[in-house]
Amino acid sequence: MPEASKMKKPDVKLVLLGDMNVGKTSLLHRYTDRKFKDTVSTVGGAFFLKQWGPYNISIWDTAGREQFHGLGSMYCRGASAVILTYDVTNWQSLAELEERFLSLTDTASHDCIFAIVGNKVDLTDPKAQLSQDSSGVSEDQTEHEEERTEPQVLSSCPTPPASPASLSGITVHKQVAHEDAMALYGRILRYKGLEEKSSLPAERMCFETSAKTGYNVDALFETLFDLVLPSILRKRNENQQCPTIDLEECRGASSKRARFCC
């Protein structure tokens, strides 16, 4: 098989889990395509490959529908990181993470990293309503940078006002506080038998994002990519000690021998 047609082998797997309509696919499209687009519900799962430095990271987008629930544990098998996604305007979507999706991660790697992500924060936080460019800076801030006397910094996990309004003028109630997500993260650590003191802190692993504006999306994925690097290096070291057989190379070698014999 020609080198160009060979599919790159993933070094590590990252999986998105969560109820339907929380925005998992939109988050992934925002990061990979740098834009927001309305999507239909994922059927089964979808696979993306991200080049991160010299490493290849596979990102699995899974279906949130109940009818595809059984496939989740298969997609999570051997995963080094799991993004548990909920909708900040829907309390039930957070509860579903613990009730339906957490058990699916039993097949993940023993050192799997968990991130709790509240999406659609642009509906509740004015700071998340400004569209972000690829560097994470709002487009409005870029256009009017010279007119401002004081720099504005977007916090990674903002505390929204009690009764925010979206850009459309419709007030949307935030049903899930950031503290609720942090509490869930603590329960996940206990479910996995991990001690909080020796684990990554909740403040670092709980995000609020907007796939629509790009708010905090780059920070989410790139934080996880950096955190799974030790897992990548460990797996590469294991593969060097116990190398696997490339069937394509074996077929190519057999074909060459057959031609020479003729």
Image (spheres, grey):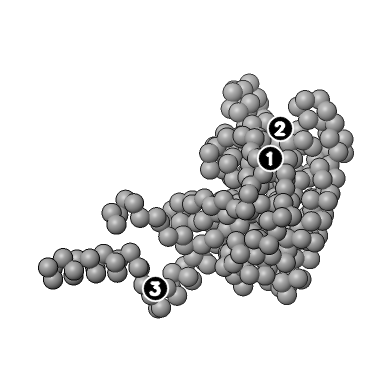
- Mark 3 belongs to which amino acid? Thr
- Mark 1 belongs to which amino acid? Ser
The Cα–Cα distance between marks 2 and 1, rounded to whole angstroms, is 8 Å
Q: Residue furthest bottom?
A: 241
Please tell me which of labels 3 and 2 falls first in the chain: 2
- Mark 2 belongs to which amino acid? Gln
- Secondary structure of residue under mark 3: loop
Relative to 258, is 118 on the left or the right? right
Please tell me which of labels 2 and 1 falls first in the chain: 2
Say if 153 sits above or below 82 in the image: above
Label 3, on which residue?
244
Label 1, on which residue?
210
Label 1, residues with CA under 10 Å away: few <14, some 14-19, many ≥20 = many
The Cα–Cα distance between marks 1 and 3, rounded to whole angstroms, is 41 Å
Asked whether the residues under the numbered discs 1 and 3 touch, taking CB atoms below 8 Å apart as contact, a structural biologist would say no
Residue 115 percent across, percent down from the top left: 67, 57
**Mark linked to residue 129:** 2
Please tell me which of labels 1 and 3 falls first in the chain: 1
Asked whether the residues under the numbered discs 2 and 1 touch, taking CB atoms below 8 Å apart as contact, a structural biologist would say yes
The one nearer the camera, 86 or 5, is 5
